[in-house]
Image (cartoon, coloured by chain):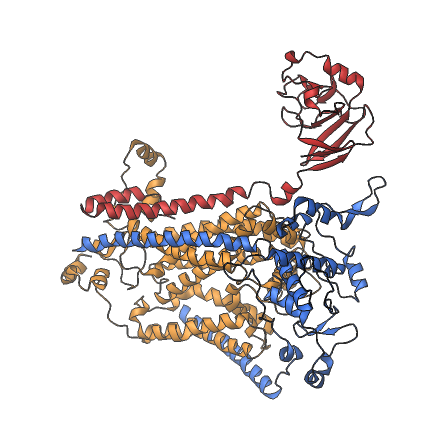
Chain colours: A red, B blue, C orange
Amino acid sequence: MASTGTADAHSEEVGVASEDGVRRRDFIEIAAVSAAGVGGLACLLPLVSQMAPSADVLAESSTELDISALEEGQSIKAVFRKQPVFVRHLTPAEIEAADAVDVGSLRDPQTLQERTEDGHHNILVVMGVCTHLGCVPLGAAEGENKGEFGGYFCPCHGSHYDTAARIRKGPAPKNLEVPTYEFTTDTTIVIG
Amino acid sequence: MIRLVGILVGLGFTFVVLLTFLVGAYTAATEPAAETAEHAFHLTPKEDVHFSFEGPVGHWDIAQLQRGYKVYKEVCSACHSLKQVAFRNLADLGYSEAQVKAEAAAWRVPGIDPNTGEATTRPGLPTDAFPSPYPNSVAAAAANNNAIPPDLSLMTKARHEGSHYVYSLLTGYQEPSAELAERFPESLPGPGLHHNPYFANLNLAMAPPLTTEGQVTYDDGTVATVDQMSQDVAAFLTWTAEPKLVKRKQTGWPVLGFLLFATILAWFAKKSVWANAKRRED
Amino acid sequence: MSFPWAKNYEPVNPVMKFMDEKLPLPRLVYNAVGAGYPVPRNLSYFWNFGILAGFCLVLQIVTGVVLAMHYAANSGIAFNSVEHIMRDVNWGWMLRYMHANGASFFFLVIYIHIFRGFFYSSYKAPREMIWLLGVVIFLLTMATAFMGYVLPWGQMSFWGAKVITGLFSAIPLVGEPIQIWLLGGFAPDNAALNRFFSLHFMLPFVILGVVILHIWALHIPGSSNPTGVEVKQESDTVPFHPYYTAKDGFGLGVFLLIYFAFVFFFPNTLGHPDNYIEANPLSTPAHIVPEWYFYPFYAILRAFTFDFIIEAKLWGVLAMFSSILVWFFLPWLDKSPVRSGHYRPMFRKFFWFGLIPCMAVLFYCGGAPAEEPYVMISQIATAYYFLHFLVILPIISSIERPEPLPFSITEAVLGSDDSAVIEPAAKAAE
């Protein structure tokens, strides 16, 4: 353990002490110190990876949701990986409002079509995590401030999202993230 | 001065402990301690079975673990919980994700009615732990004549020679010997107790759980003798106690190999450094 | 301080020169464990165990800090959180086994280190302070290990906490209030577990501090050596680096081989199965014992079973604490002018045929059930233990005739020392 730090100081000394045999001896000492280094580095593997999500945390990384009771215009909040997910059943008016926007003018250009699943373009699933600094935007629950564009509004730093949960105003750089999900039946979605 | 005090203190302690010794020796001589039934009749676990996971290169016998799981599910789980193990862990036993899901769903775990909030049960999810058969320890005690069936997750680590202990206990039920009846009549099993020389105090509240051949029907066609079922469930409980047992041994070899290599290098390095010291002296 | 021939640190490049002027940390290391520290050239492998103990301390701190990231010090979930580490945390099983076996190996190394000190009388002048600090380190390590063993909240954890805090209840009058205060309750529970965790986390850093003092104190007179003859001249020493770094590196390799063999193949052999049963305040395990490294002291505790003037319980507690406290007085109990057991015929006999068998018996009996004949055997061993340190050592140090010592370490190593002929002149010069 203590030997690694001052190794080179020593090999110089050996070089001075004797001309012949220096190479062989240098080699064995460098090899020993290198082996200690390799061993030390190998110790980092468990020490670093123990901080990564443990098996039980990884096992909880999919969420099944029943949306059969979700009426048009309603939203529900679910939990995916200990973070909120917003599922909104869009009204025709909201879809129209989203489609009316010139995509090219958006900060993070995406259409509602791209942000929803084929056959279920009226169901918008997004993470309830503001892309600015991670607060939970308002707008999913009844009576909450939906912001200037009728979608979601993050009160922390004033980011406004539209009905397709795209960033329209405020400091957030991206649209609300659409998690990986799929419809296993017409009314069941599995997130993750 | 310190030495004088030291000698006095030392003689003091010595005097007291020797006095204690003499009193103890006198007691031992006049009224020798009676032998206990545990001393005379308790047996250490049988060593005549060999498990695949034993030894420095041990590995799991997946088929055996699956059979053991079936024994646990159909017999043990009626009374014993397995709370440290989750259904998702069954993937280690060679079950596919779908099988694990189906297996979990076949169990009922405590849940909450989503509409009323009342306590209820729901089908298990892979992330759930094996449920306890009793809602709490009071219920467990009440249902079992005050003997709470212990959780089995760590049983093989919580006993000496755990895997062999479980096997021995399950196959060790027998009628108390005539000698026991004669010498220690108070150690004969009372009502609701069962004699088993592998159990610490010889009297076990658990009735023999595995009694008849074919009590469990194995999917792989293995004949389910009592001995076979006991071995299988002992292996299964070894896995539940230490699922990383095989990985531990598999990690051990490369680590020791590398260390051996590094230590040999260090030996030569040390020799070459010290050769220098000898030379300088000339 | 150092010997006049110690090599002086010379920074080789501007960066190191800058560093040396502003914060001479490289110089400190160079003088402590580098070429700037001249060490007797005749140290045996028994002198490896100081570095090994330091390594164990670092190992325990590193694995311990990592385990603390996953452990929950709450009596409701502590046991489950340990199983969470064993089952779900990445490499958690290995880190926990390393920490648990690390404690055992730490004590093994410490015991060899201490008994090397006994045999070579490393406690004698001018090294008294090193010894005293060492005993402090040992006591702190014992306290830390005890509290660490409580954390998994198994049966042995719980009953260990109850029994060890129960020792304090032997103190007349204030004993029981002290026990309740220590536990923060009438039996070990959440309050006790939380404070033990806090102290278990904090004490290793205190130990680290005392270890630094221990090494500092060591560098005043320099290391002792197997002849017990002090360093006289340059030819008696070699620079710590590379000679002892190389030797310690090899020793460390051997140590790690044995240690990891336990971690990977016998991880629970040194532990007790009962600690895999969750703590149950209503049922005591049939046979409660501490971890193996406390066996000798546990045997001394249990040796007193007879009320003589004061009650037996108090005698046991007094004797157990005294058995370590006597070590503090060793430098003044053993006044022999010769240090090394190699040149002390009587001392050597009592060491090999008295102290070592006595410790072996105490180790054995401390782990055995509290029944005959173990109690009686441990009583004899306890009597010898106190006689050895408090009576035999002071007496033989005055009556023993030591064997002739070598003139110098150089002579001990090479069989002759050229400077020996000028001894009178050298003496006069001093």
Which of the two residues, A144 or C216, is positioned nearer the viewer here?
Answer: A144
Residue B67 horizontal/vertical position (percent): 67, 58
Can residue C103 be seen here? The reply is no
Q: Is residue A52 left or right of residue A117?
A: left
Say above or below: B229 vs B178. above
Q: Residue at x 32, y 55 (%)?
A: B267
Residue at 43% in and 43% down: A41
The residue most toward the right is B116
Q: State left or right for residue B253 relative to residue C27.
A: right
Q: Is residue C137 left or right of residue C146?
A: left
Residue under the point 59% across and 84% down? B28
- For residue A5, which quarter of the picture? top left
Residue C29 visible to an observer of this rendering: yes
Percent from the top left, x then y, of residue B239? 61, 57
Residue C29 vertical placement versus A183 (above, below): below
Residue A37 pos. (x, y %): 39, 44
Q: Position of residue C318 (x, y in %)?
A: 54, 68
Q: Is residue C65 left or right of residue C28?
A: right
Q: Residue furthest bottom?
A: B30
C403 and C312: which is toward the camera: C403
Quarter of the C terminus of chain C within the rendering: bottom left
Q: Quadrant of residue C309?
A: bottom right
- Pick the front one: C415 or A81: A81
Give the residue drawn at x 54%, y 46%. C66
Which residue is more in the foreground, B164 or B11? B164
Count numbered badges in the picture. Answer: 0
The residue at the far front in this view is B221
